[in-house]
């Protein structure tokens, strides 16, 4: 198995779905990136995006 890098950035947006979707779409548009999870938290206005790439 090859080596991969996992990134788990937090974004200060958990309510505006258009902004959240734009962030996720930007990650997915990068060749080789696999989005593993998106956790939205409207109460704390945060989104955690988990993705990996070679």
Image: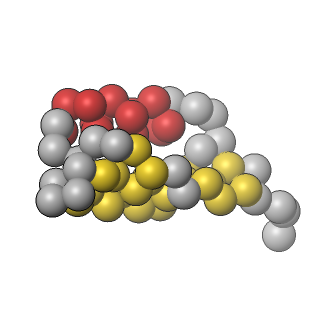
Question: Farthest residue toward the right?
Answer: 2
Q: How has the structure been colored for display?
A: secondary structure
Percent coordinates x, y for residue 1 in the rendering: 83, 69
Percent coordinates x, y for residue 7 in the rendering: 61, 54
Q: Which quadrant holds residue 23?
A: top left
Q: On the rendered structure, is 27 left or right of 6?
A: left
Residue at left offset 40%, top offset 44%: 11
Percent coordinates x, y for residue 43 in the rendering: 15, 59
Along the viewing direction, whichever of 39 and 30 lies nearer the viewer: 39
Along the viewing direction, whichever of 23 and 11 lies nearer the viewer: 11
Residue at left offset 67%, top offset 50%: 53
Q: Which quadrant holds residue 21?
A: top left
Residue at left offset 84%, top offset 62%: 2
Question: Farthest residue toward the bottom?
Answer: 1
Residue at left offset 30%, top offset 52%: 46
Question: Farthest residue toward the front?
Answer: 44
Along the viewing direction, whichever of 29 and 39 lies nearer the viewer: 39
| Residue 28 vertical position relative to residue 8 in the rendered view, above or below | above
Q: On the rendered structure, is 52 left or right of 11?
A: right
Q: On the rendered structure, is 14 left or right of 8?
A: left
Percent coordinates x, y for residue 51 in the rendering: 54, 54
């Amino acid at each position: 198995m090859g080596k991969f890098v996992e990134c788990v950035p937090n974004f200060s947006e958990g309510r505006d779905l258009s902004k959240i979707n734009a962030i996720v779409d930007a990650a997915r548009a990068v060749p080789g990136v696999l989005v593993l999870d998106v956790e939205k938290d409207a109460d704390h206005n945060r989104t955690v995006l988990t993705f990996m790439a070679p």
